[in-house]
Image (cartoon, rainbow, N blue to C red):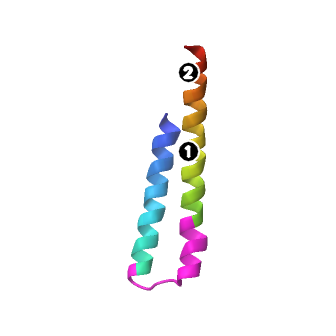
Amino acid sequence: MDYIKTGLIISTIIIFLSMVFLEYDVLSVNTIKDVFVIPAFIINVALIFKVFKKNKQNSDVV
């Protein structure tokens, strides 16, 4: 379960950085989307699949 906590922290930091960069117009919207939002989405989807896979394995055992 430690990888889920680490992944959520990384994803939260990525999303926070994208909001800060958008607020101060440091980068363009397309760059922020490509560099920050899409990787955060990929991290979250990977974590969701791991959680569902682990829950499915636990329910098969019971």
For this view, does 20 lie left or right of residue 7? left
Q: Is residue 6 magenta?
A: no
Chain-order first, disc 1 or disc 2:
1
Question: Residue at left 44%, top 60%?
Answer: 13
Vertical arrangement, residue 4 with respect to residue 31, above or below: above
Q: Position of residue 5 (x, y in %)?
A: 45, 42
Vertical arrangement, residue 26 with respect to residue 58, above or below: below
What range is drawn magenta here? 23-37
Q: Position of residue 43 (x, y in %)?
A: 57, 53
Local SS, label 1: helix
Question: Residue at left 57%, top 35%?
Answer: 52
Secondary structure mostly seen in the magenta stretch:
helix
Query: How many numbered markers are drawn?
Result: 2
Residue highlighted by disc 2: 59
Viewer-nearest residue: 26 or 46: 46
Question: Residue at left 59%, top 15%?
Answer: 61
Vertical arrangement, residue 53 with respect to residue 14, above or below: above
Residue highlighted by disc 1: 47
